[in-house]
Amino acid sequence: MSNTTVWLIFSLICGILSLGIGVYLFVWVKNQDDGNDRTREVAGWIHSGARAYLKKLYAALIIVSVIMAAVLSAVYTFDGSGRGLATALCYLIGAVCSAIAGYLGMEVAVRANVRSAVAANHSMPSAFNIAFRGGAVMGFAVVGVATIGMSAIYMVTKDSQMVLAFSLGASSLALLAKAGGGIYTKTADIAADLVGKVEVGIPEDDPRNPAVVADNVGDNVGDVAGMGADIFDSYVASAVAAMLLGATMQEIHYTILPLLLCALGILASIIGVYLVQVKEDGKPGKALNMGTIITCAAFAVLMIIAILIIPEIANRYIWAILIGTSIGIVIGQTTEFFTSDEFKPVQLTAEYSASGAAITIISGISYGLISIVPSILGIVISMLVSFYVCGGATDFTLGIYGVGISAVGMLAISGMIVSADAYGPIVDNARGIAEMSGMDQEVIDRADVLDSAGNTAKAITKGFSIAAAALTVLALFAAFVSEINLALVPYGKTFTIEDISLVNPLILAGLFLGAMCPPLFSALTMLSVTQNAFKMIEEIRAQFREHPEILEGTMTPDYNRPISLAAEGALKSLILPAVIAIVFPLAVGFIMGPKGLTAFLGGAIITGVIFALFMSNSGGLWDNAKKYVEAGNFGGKGSEAHKAAVIGDTVGDPFKDTAGPSLNTLITVMSLVASTFAPVIAVYHLFQ
Amino acid sequence: MSNTTVWLIFSLICGILSLGIGVYLFVWVKNQDDGNDRTREVAGWIHSGARAYLKKLYAALIIVSVIMAAVLSAVYTFDGSGRGLATALCYLIGAVCSAIAGYLGMEVAVRANVRSAVAANHSMPSAFNIAFRGGAVMGFAVVGVATIGMSAIYMVTKDSQMVLAFSLGASSLALLAKAGGGIYTKTADIAADLVGKVEVGIPEDDPRNPAVVADNVGDNVGDVAGMGADIFDSYVASAVAAMLLGATMQEIHYTILPLLLCALGILASIIGVYLVQVKEDGKPGKALNMGTIITCAAFAVLMIIAILIIPEIANRYIWAILIGTSIGIVIGQTTEFFTSDEFKPVQLTAEYSASGAAITIISGISYGLISIVPSILGIVISMLVSFYVCGGATDFTLGIYGVGISAVGMLAISGMIVSADAYGPIVDNARGIAEMSGMDQEVIDRADVLDSAGNTAKAITKGFSIAAAALTVLALFAAFVSEINLALVPYGKTFTIEDISLVNPLILAGLFLGAMCPPLFSALTMLSVTQNAFKMIEEIRAQFREHPEILEGTMTPDYNRPISLAAEGALKSLILPAVIAIVFPLAVGFIMGPKGLTAFLGGAIITGVIFALFMSNSGGLWDNAKKYVEAGNFGGKGSEAHKAAVIGDTVGDPFKDTAGPSLNTLITVMSLVASTFAPVIAVYHLFQ
């Protein structure tokens, strides 16, 4: 058995181990106490709402995947490569794998929420444990299924092109799940708040609000299913980009190194997750952060040992991987400076709020724009260091591979990152269930503590995932160019780097067209939120008008109408964004050729990263500025500053949960579509 | 006398003619009736406030120019080219020329405002005439002084490098005038509105408001002096870029063609301005638009005749120039779709406002982001068409020159554009003076009609000037690369296009760093507005608190304290933005070398154009959504929708008048700094 086969089997085993732990934790969570009839009833509403949405989402996914699979199979049969069916099949497997991970994560989240709320009646550590282990199901499911899928496909086909098709399949779901979930959750959130809190003056999560269940379903479909699909996508894409780049190198070990790193990341995440503990008076936020740092350290040690004992891999790649892992964490931390209430940006924005909402908005947008600077510096440094350490201009291929493997280094610890991130919506839901089922104030207070830790974890992982996506797409970008070159070999042509010179107007045109897409995409998703929220507001008002008993608390509102409004609205709104993500790059490729498409991707990556950082951080800042005022600063709740801060927070909602994070997925999908179709585009296109 | 000398003399004469007409109109405006003691008193406050600011601005300019001139003279003495003193001198001439044009424009604006208000007592056409001719002084001064300066310098030195130094001088002033004026005007505007209208409930332009004079001064320093310096800058930069590109071609006529086009544009603008007429019941907005279209047509005819009768210039450049001129107008018109209340975006945003300010903001931002699409398509089309028509990939130099000359075609009609644009702040001021000096409602209504025409003209010219700046910097970008190549000739090196391949991580790093600058720049200018407005709000509140007689109308407030607060705040806030514009490109150039700097400029151009369009259009949209509600829709004044729309408008103020339009100047200055220092950077830099 060859050396590389051992590696593949090792990563397959680690994948299976990860999935096994996920299933074990699932059963553990399911066996916890889910309280009385009331808590079960409330949780049941959320559960069935989430299922109803997932059903519709998967129906939409089937349509998209069947079309894409048909196109892929036609294209790669027509071009004579004979890979049509295999490509389509791998694509479908990718979509299905991502769906399985998302389904598991969601099914556990809608169980962990109520069990965590019930446990909060007794102690904080047990409530924390249930929520965190619920999140860990998602974490281990995502990295486990992804690693199994990639390793198995590569073992069978020995072709990284097939893993690319798998990755595109996962991306298709990610696009639908992330953007759709983002629209769903903010539609419900904004509508519930505007009518509930502002118009009729009932508290958050009040069961009299017809949109309250939709709002809690939204946390699950947006922050659990959407986020999981997003990281699944980036995780696979980063590995595939490095595999494609590795395939251009002479030594096959480089092609498989990414899978080995995924396996080591799984082992490190198991250690990290196992060590996350919180005491009754401890800080859950600190525990989550500590888990991330332990995971990083464990991964670094395992990775260094592995590379040192494998003679085929040059030792300098250790540096590339280390800088990837550490820059991800550093970027996450700088995000905190701009979004935590311990620092100037949030405090000043809260202070300015006393002069009216306009100043709140201007201040939040300004700090959000400034917040892109440290992250971009981090991305640039990690790209340049990994490039120059591994090869540099003299050995271009080795250098570019360094950039790719650096992204894998960042994403290898995704198991832990997703666990900490999925914890957030679970405790958010737990708080909602505690409120809706009328638990004591003490329990709600405990849930609040858990909830705010979730927000901190979320802010950090958001910065991490944008940075990781940026490095990934940069690697994919290079992979795309090598794909084009590969495709041109039989024609005796080469796609040399002078073809994509920056001064060529075709390249500049491509850059501009690409750069235009992310802002357009975020605008369309945000407009969908406002339009759908507008419809849902009408629905809520109608329920209050027709049945005044609802507000008196003597009649249960119709929770289902808002739920189906949100679900249908979100899925309908996906058509245009999907066109931007899939049809635009193909159109540019077949019209402007590989040069134009290269530039198009470059432009999209640049503004994609900038807008994703800006919108996520502005949104996080407003959220915490509002909480800072609510904590009693500048007049506290009910003051003018508070009103202004609430407006800021509402603007921030679609920024940070719809438009901003979907951009990760957008640029990944665009890059994958381009790479997958590269062999055809290289040969057939209108202009040179 | 050679053919080309005749051209140079012709453009010099046209420049002198233009300046002469400007001076004639200045005297004409000055001789109009300036009313009674009260109107003279009110106008006097504005006049002296504007002068005080201009004094400080020019003092800041002297500091910046002396430093830059010293650096330029040192660098070009040290490098052995012996051009040190000449370069520094041309740079200073550029700064002084731009200052002269701005001074003339401002001096006439602060006279035309009161005279237009007085004339509005009698008839609308006479009020319109005074305001428009006042604006035309600025228009003709800008293009006149610029054309005289460029032609004279080229006649004396025969070196387009010296015209480049002249252009950088003009840009230095533009940066200070545009960003500083933008910060000044919105500081005063927001502070005056928030305390005056919102807190104490007195109307706009009420003389009891201590910030009312500062607000009116702001219109002049931001919209007249700032805008004039901005267009002066783009106008000269577009001509210089084409001249530099022309200098690489064998035929000298191509170097001088840009100056000839400027001269023809002046003649066309004279025709256009002369034909702008409005009747008592006519629409001033239509008259202004008609003037622009006539100018374009006249320019097209003159240009076609000139190129046909000059055998040295290939006829295909006619197409490049025509597409430049027409795309400018088309982009201006699409801007109207997103910012005029006759179309969906403004109407829907106004409708959504009934659900609260958050929705107003999200909707305005979304439409603003979508609005970049037609403009970017326009820029891309005009770039590609002019490139492929004039040479394309087979004759790269000719093609790139086509892009440059297309930008000149767009900006040649600046005389008319500036006239229509400067009309806006004059009538805005006239309305203010009418209110402050207690004229009849009928007069104020007339002033309102004139004012709203000014807003339409302004929206269109804003789209035009961003598009023009985009094409100009694209040409400058190519000019920069040819500068680098020129500088490397003595060293036997060439800077070939493979050096700036998109897949090189150094290039990607440069793109990211450059792309980061425009958002950072706009954030810093917007934060300055909020911080300065915050201070001014304190000052206004203090005056009301210490002297309650002010609000009773029995005591004149201290208008000077807000004026000097605004002026000092604005100029102090310029330090960081100036560092971004001048020091960043130099730092990137000397560290990352010409490749990195090329990519840096490319990145800055892309996000610069995107953010400029987005912010200007969102701001314009909110402004008109507010006016649409005030016209009685969705509840009219005082309704919830109105309150939300006012918040939108206040957010839009620094978007459209501070951050957005300053980005034009930023990317022009960056490009000019890079080109000017290209010969040194090409030789001395840290990394390859």
Image (cartoon, coloured by chain):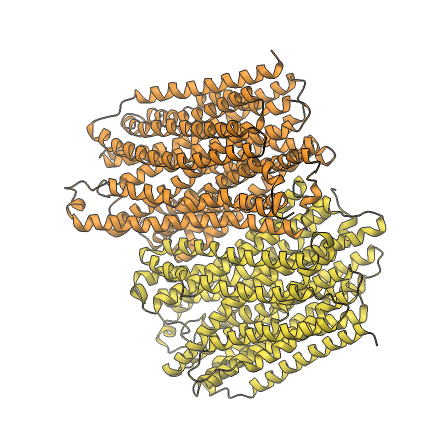
Chain colours: A yellow, B orange
Residue at 47% x, 29% y is B94
Vertical position of residue A77 compared to residue B37: above or below: below
The image shows residue A222 at horizontal and vertical percentages of 54, 68
Front one among B358 and A457: A457
Residue B405 visible, this angle = no
Residue B668 visible, this angle = yes
Q: Residue furthest top?
A: B1
The image shows residue A613 at horizontal and vertical percentages of 52, 58
Q: Is B95 on the left or on the right of B44, as rendered?
A: right
Front one among B683 and B207: B683
Q: Is A569 on the left or on the right of B131, as rendered?
A: right
The image shows residue A361 at horizontal and vertical percentages of 40, 55
Which quarter of the picture shows residue A651?
bottom left
Vertical position of residue A92 compared to residue B472: above or below: below
Q: Which image quarter holds the N terminus of chain B?
A: top right
Vertical position of residue A478 compared to residue B41: above or below: below
Front one among A149 and A194: A149
The image shows residue B668 at horizontal and vertical percentages of 52, 38
Which quarter of the picture shows residue B285?
top left
Q: How many marks?
A: 0
